[in-house]
């Protein structure tokens, strides 16, 4: 029965070919050797305290790897996650081990879900705006361990959809303003960067019960209603018009030449957004590619899409990139970027 249900409700290999996983539990069926999914002890696996310990170790490994060999301290470090919490955090412990206590401020941006990269950029932009230091640097690090929150006893279609989409993923990127302190902030990834033109987020009216990400005894649990695609679609075009207007740009005039970084909540989310906005397939190709290669890594996914775009032939200097993601609220969060040439970026 389970294979039949997975074929019906799960995401197929042509949509998600590979997903990252921090847990070795997913690689074998020796139940007594598992960290979390010890089904001989409970059909639900280990409780939240054990899962929190696993998260702490995984997040620390990820952040340590991101900053391995790094000797230059960031002025600010923002840690983003919605899949586990421990205090002091992995970011704080990193700063302590590096001896950066007097150089680096740590800020936590937690439990916002898949759209959290954009609020984190907004926070980082605020830090840059409050300093006269031309070389001020804000690093943002995401550690998402979504696979910690599987409930093996829940075989509902909704949870089969959720668990076939989500994966573990991590990413680090940088915001800086290296010239005039009044100039626009720049988001740096490997070998290139974006100039940030506009950021916005809005909550859709009468939608608070349509998407939830709650903490339970056996892990975190996501619930989704069938109304989510329709409600997001109804609000999306007007949101994009307002986002472009922040940068004194006309959405309709710029849409056909822009690239769209859509958070790949799933293949149907990308397709629904593209249909609603009237996009050509190539305009959202990077989102499909990241979903295929990595799955939905919650808040860490959108930065991977930004990086994928920068690696593509379409990322010419001056190219507009419109980014959009969704989460509980229902929240629509967006950013408008412009590709610029940068050398020696993190």
Image (cartoon, rainbow, N blue to C red):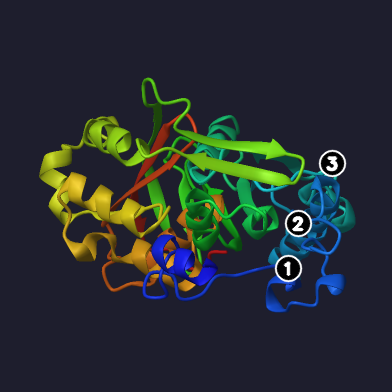
- Upstream in sequence: badge 3 or badge 2: 2
Q: Secondary structure at mark 1?
A: loop
Residue shown at 19% from the left, 50% from the top = 275
Residue 247 spot, x, y in % from top left: 28, 35
Q: Nearer the viewer, mark 2 or mark 1?
A: 2
Q: Nearer the viewer, residue 97 or 206?
A: 206
Distance from the alpha carbon under mark 3 to that under mark 2 = 29 Å
Q: Is residue 266 left or right of residue 251?
A: right
Q: Nearer the viewer, residue 74 or 234?
A: 234
Q: Is residue 140 above or below residue 267?
A: above
Q: Secondary structure at mark 3?
A: loop
Residue at the far front: name it. Answer: 1
- Upstream in sequence: badge 2 or badge 1: 1
Distance from the alpha carbon under mark 3 to that under mark 1 = 21 Å
Residue shown at 65% from the left, 56% from the top = 150
Q: Which residue is mark 2?
A: 43
Q: Is residue 254 left or right of residue 299?
A: left
Q: Is residue 34 left or right of residue 277?
A: right
Q: Nearer the viewer, residue 203 or 244?
A: 203
Image quarter of the C terminus: bottom right
- Upstream in sequence: badge 3 or badge 1: 1
Residue 210 spot, x, y in % from top left: 44, 32
Q: Nearer the viewer, mark 3 or mark 2?
A: 2
Q: Nearer the viewer, residue 17 or 135?
A: 17
Q: Which residue is mark 3?
A: 87
Residue 248 visible in rendering: no
Residue 113 spot, x, y in % from top left: 55, 42
Q: Which residue is mark 1?
A: 23
Distance from the alpha carbon under mark 2 to that under mark 1 = 18 Å
Residue shown at 32% from the left, 41% from the top = 229
């Amino acid at each position: 029965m389970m294979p039949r249900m997975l074929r019906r409700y799960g995401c197929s290999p042509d949509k998600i070919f590979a997903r990252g996983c921090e847990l070795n539990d997913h690689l074998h069926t020796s139940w007594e050797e598992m960290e979390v999914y010890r089904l001989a002890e409970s059909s639900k696996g280990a409780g939240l305290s054990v899962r929190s310990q696993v998260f702490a170790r995984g997040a620390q490994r990820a952040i340590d790897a991101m900053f391995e060999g790094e000797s230059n301290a960031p002025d600010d470090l923002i840690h983003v996650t919605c899949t586990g919490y421990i205090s002091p955090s992995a970011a704080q412990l990193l700063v302590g081990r590096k001896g950066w206590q007097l150089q680096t401020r740590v800020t936590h941006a937690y439990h916002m879900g898949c759209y959290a990269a954009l609020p984190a950029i907004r926070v980082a932009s605020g830090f840059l705006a409050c300093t006269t230091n031309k070389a001020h640097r804000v690093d943002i690090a995401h550690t998402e361990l979504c696979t910690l929150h599987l409930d093996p006893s829940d075989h509902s279609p909704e949870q089969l959809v959720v668990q076939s989409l989500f994966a573990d993923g991590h990413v680090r990127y940088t915001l800086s303003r290296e010239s005039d302190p009044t100039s626009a902030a720049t988001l740096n990834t490997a070998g290139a960067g974006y100039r940030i033109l506009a950021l916005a987020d809005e909550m859709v009216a009468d939608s608070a019960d349509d998407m939830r990400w709650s903490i339970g005894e056996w892990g975190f649990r996501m619930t989704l209603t069938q109304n989510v695609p329709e409600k997001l679609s109804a609000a999306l075009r007007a949101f994009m018009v307002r986002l472009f207007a922040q940068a004194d740009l006309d959405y309709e005039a710029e849409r056909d030449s822009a690239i769209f970084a859509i958070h790949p909540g799933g293949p149907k989310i990308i397709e629904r957004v593209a249909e609603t906005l009237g996009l050509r397939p190539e305009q959202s190709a990077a989102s499909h590619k990241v979903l295929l290669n990595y799955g939905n890594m919650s808040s860490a996914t959108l930065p991977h899409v930004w990086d994928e775009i920068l690696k593509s032939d379409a990322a010419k200097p001056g190219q507009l990139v419109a980014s959009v993601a969704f989460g509980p609220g229902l929240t629509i969060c967006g950013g408008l970027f412009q590709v610029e040439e940068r050398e020696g970026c993190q």
